[in-house]
Amino acid sequence: MSETTISALLLTLKTASLSTLIVMIPGTLLAYALARYAFPGKDIIATLVGLPLVMPPTAVGYLLLKLFSTHGLLGPDTLGFNPDILLTWKAVVVACSVMATPLVVRTARVTFEGINPRLEVMARTLGHGRVKTFFLYTLPLATRGLLAALILGFTRAVGEFGATITIAGNIPGRTQTLSTAIFTAQQVGRDREAYFLLAVALLVGFAAIMASEYLARKGPGYLAG
Amino acid sequence: MPHRILLFFVGALLIAGCSGKRQAPPAGGHTKLLIFAAASLQDVIREVGQTYSADHPVAFSYNFAGSNVLARQLAAAPVADIYFSASEHWMDYVQQAGVIRAETRRTFLSNGLVIIGQRTSHWTVTSPADLASLGYRYLSLANPDAVPAGRYAREWLQSISLGDSTLWAAVQDRVAPGPDVRAALGLVEADPDILGIVYRTDAAISDRVMVLYTVPIDQGPPIRYAVALVANRPHEQAAAQFLNFLASPRAQEIFTRAGFVPLNPSHQGAVQ
């Protein structure tokens, strides 16, 4: 395998893991808030968070490009320092995080909605505060669903193409990921490399779906620790 | 509610269906030709096509991309009528794949390479070797493994020796390969820290880049655009007539104005 193929795989694992980590914690908290509470602007927030799921990834990428470009709202001129995001591996993480958010939040929200609120009320009557109840009871009950959210978010990040190529480019050894490497290998006619990457993508996808099927079959897991 | 949603989709389909019909050729009977052309020809072929359509019953649709992408698309599904390649290499490829009518193939244009930077940037390039020493971030090229513009650029950089190595070896680490030459141009337009090598005709269509260095024609690799008819297509005669028009003074004038160099039109016979 060529050096650039291996670096594309490593970069994909690194950026997909990082973006999943970045999204998981705020995503879980937001999902819980959306599942349990009514607050002003709730529909707007839920819609905004869901948008990347239904928008063309290239459109999301273009939006991010404008946001992070020199004069953009999150660009060097506005911030006063240069976050150096565009065309670096950080841009891959940004793209993957944004694109993975809706899947994580939606899956987590459904999970929380599936947990009987009475269990939380019971915990509260036993003298636990809201925060303690969440960490001691709700979170453990949601473990399986949150794992499924994690897997979906991770695989979405692994497969991200449109937003990534728009803001991170497709630079071998630097910002080239599994999916952009397949695109290049196919265009350039390096079929063996394309087949290899295809096999890796199949393997990752297969394992992810198997795992999430397994988690789904186990149900919400009321008794799981 | 579900009924309304269904109704919406049926309605959308009906509207799409009707508007599709409206776009169909008028009663006069236009022949529709599909052209696959190298990305660098994007503007000039459109203009040639418009000029031709003005007094011929022919309408064109276009697919512009890197010549390598088009060649591979044609090898998989030869759905175009005419293929314009920015290099002989990819024309050889489709010819070996049996996609084109080899007797219609001709080499008809040349071009030149330039080093470009964003218009607001402060770079100066007085000799090619500056590419090795300047502190720019990326050198934007069309993918030098496959896309003609990138292959020409690499050939040129490899031909310049620097110490006991070549200029290519010195800049290789900073190359950002794009899917076609217009994408390479776009990257330079977007970022003042990026230099690029594109055709001079690409630099000419953008008001956001400036030419930092022009590769002298005799020092760069010979750039050759080839064109051929795709075999077994329904409108071969109309396509052949358009191919002959490319050698006409009117078409040549359009190519020249865009910065291309028409190649010996007189040496190449008409297509039957």
Image (cartoon, helix red, strand yellow):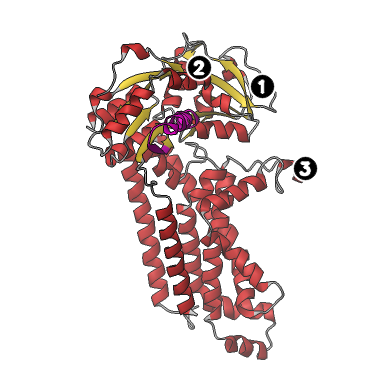
The residue indicated by pointer 1 is B123
Q: Residue at x 47, y 45 (%)?
A: A177
Q: Say which element carries label 2.
A: helix
Amino acid type, label 1: Trp
Q: Position of residue A110 (x, y in %)?
A: 52, 75
| Callout 1 secondary element | loop
Quarter holding the C terminus of chain B is: top left
Q: CA distance from mark 2 to mark 1?
A: 18 Å
In this rendered view, identify the residue nearer to me: B128 or A60. A60
Residue B39 appears in view: no
Amino acid at dot 3: Gly
Tell me which residue sits at (62%, 36%) in the image: B190
Assign the magenta stretch its main secondary structure: helix
**Number of other residues with Cα within 10 Å of mark 3, as a class: few under 14, some 14 to 19, many 20 or more:** few
According to the picture, the residue beneath numbered tag 3 turns out to be A80
Residue corresponding to mark 2: B167
First to last magenta residue range: B40-63
Q: Are marks 3 and 2 in contact (CB under 8 Å)?
A: no
Which residue reaches farthest front?
A: B28
Other-residue count near label 2 (Cα within 10 Å), few / some / many at <14 / 14–19 / ≥20: many
Residue B51 magenta-highlighted: yes
Based on the displayed image, in which of its 4 quarters is residue A128 positioned?
Answer: bottom right
Q: Nearer the viewer, residue A177 or B67?
A: B67
Depth order, front residue of B155/B186: B186
Residue type, numbered disc 2: Leu
Chain of the residue displaying label 3? A
Quarter occupied by residue B221: top left
CA gap between label 3 and label 2 equals 36 Å
- Determine the chain carrying the residue at label 1: B
